[in-house]
Image (tube, rainbow, N blue to C red):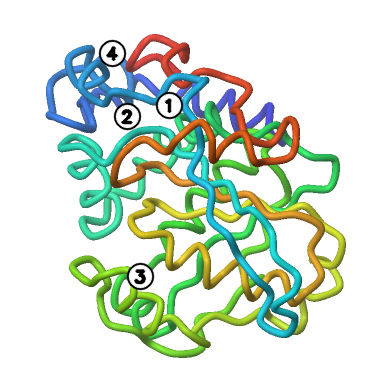
Amino acid sequence: MKRASRLIGAALGPLVDFVYPPRCCGCGSSLGTQTGLCLPCWQSLDAFPGDTPVTVLRVAAKADAARQIALPIHAAVPYNSLARTLLLAFKHGGRISHAPLLARLMAANAPPPAERRIVVPVPLHRSRLWRRGYNQAVLLGRELQKLGQGRLIVDALCRVRATPMLGTRSRADRQALLAGAVTVNPRRCEALSGADVLLVDDVMTSGATFTACAEALLGAGVASISGLCFARAGTTPSRKAAASLPEGSGRPHTDARNLAIPGVP
């Protein structure tokens, strides 16, 4: 089935390129293939090198405050001007075709795959999902599953209460608004129990959303949680924080800057 799909894609590729000429996802300049970046945009994206320390959040389970974990958040790029352009188009502009490109960059800086890893997207409340038409974290998770980063469970988490846009709010405000807003889907508790979870979102600013999701997941008995996002706002975290992680979990195994030539799959 996959082979047939690739053959059909290869056969129809020239026709698609004729009708929709390949353009850079960042600036719109001409490219040799679909969903890529031109060289200037690739360079300005400033992908994190493989030895960049991860952001580490401290998370406690809701039901058992004594159970605390270090939650490493891996990111592909800093939240700069080009990352913002890509994410706004992807998240609010309907450019869901950006998902494979963003996911490839994310996978390059993801923690090494675990034997029983489950990819869990950060959930949207149904009202926002109806307005937007899709959950960008689910689209990224789907591509990450194709790249061998784990098995995707789309509805592992539920956003049970709508929250206002968090973009301009402080960390304390975000935490207060997200308190109790995310829960584990009861139907997925068995699948999550004892699993290594890769929690996926498009961007991390204060870490409040990742923290709220991780608190809920801890209550389901997961073995470990790592976060993965496309862009990370703020400064580069300290190496001291990364050193506090268990061995092997704090460093990505591939450098995002060593991916294929921009515009070439």
Q: Secondary structure at mark 3?
A: loop
Q: In this figure, which residue is indicated by the disc labeled 2?
A: 16
Q: In this figure, which residue is indicated by the disc labeled 1?
A: 12
Determine crowd level at label 4: few under 14, some 14-19, many 20+ residues with C-alpha closer than 10 A: some
Q: CA distance from mark 1 to mark 2?
A: 6 Å
Q: CA distance from mark 4 to mark 1?
A: 15 Å
Q: CA distance from mark 2 to mark 3?
A: 24 Å
- Tell me whether circle 3 and circle 1 mark residues in contact (CB < 8 Å): no
What residue appears at the point 44 percent right and 19 percent down from the top-left corner? 49
Task: Identify whether 259 is placed above or below 104.
Answer: above
Q: Secondary structure at mark 4?
A: loop
Determine crowd level at label 2: few under 14, some 14-19, many 20+ residues with C-alpha closer than 10 A: few
Q: Secondary structure at mark 2?
A: helix
Q: Which amino acid type corresponds to the residue marked 1 in the rendered image?
A: Leu
Q: Is residue 50 left or right of residue 168?
A: right
- Tell me whether circle 2 and circle 3 mark residues in contact (CB < 8 Å): no
Q: CA distance from mark 3 to mark 1?
A: 27 Å
Q: In this figure, which residue is indicated by the disc labeled 4?
A: 32
Residue 91 pos. (x, y %):
29, 56
Residue 150 pos. (x, y %):
71, 44
Q: Which amino acid type corresponds to the residue marked 2 in the rendered image?
A: Val
Badge 3 or badge 1: first in the primary sequence: 1
- Tell me whether circle 4 and circle 1 mark residues in contact (CB < 8 Å): no
Q: CA distance from mark 2 to mark 4?
A: 12 Å
Q: In this figure, which residue is indicated by the disc labeled 3?
A: 133
Q: Which amino acid type corresponds to the residue marked 3 in the rendered image?
A: Gly
Residue 241 pos. (x, y %):
54, 40
Q: Is residue 19 left or right of residue 98?
A: left
What residue appears at the point 87 percent right and 61 percent down from the top-left corner? 194
Q: Which amino acid type corresponds to the residue marked 4 in the rendered image?
A: Gly
- Tell me whether circle 4 and circle 3 mark residues in contact (CB < 8 Å): no
Determine crowd level at label 1: few under 14, some 14-19, many 20+ residues with C-alpha closer than 10 A: few
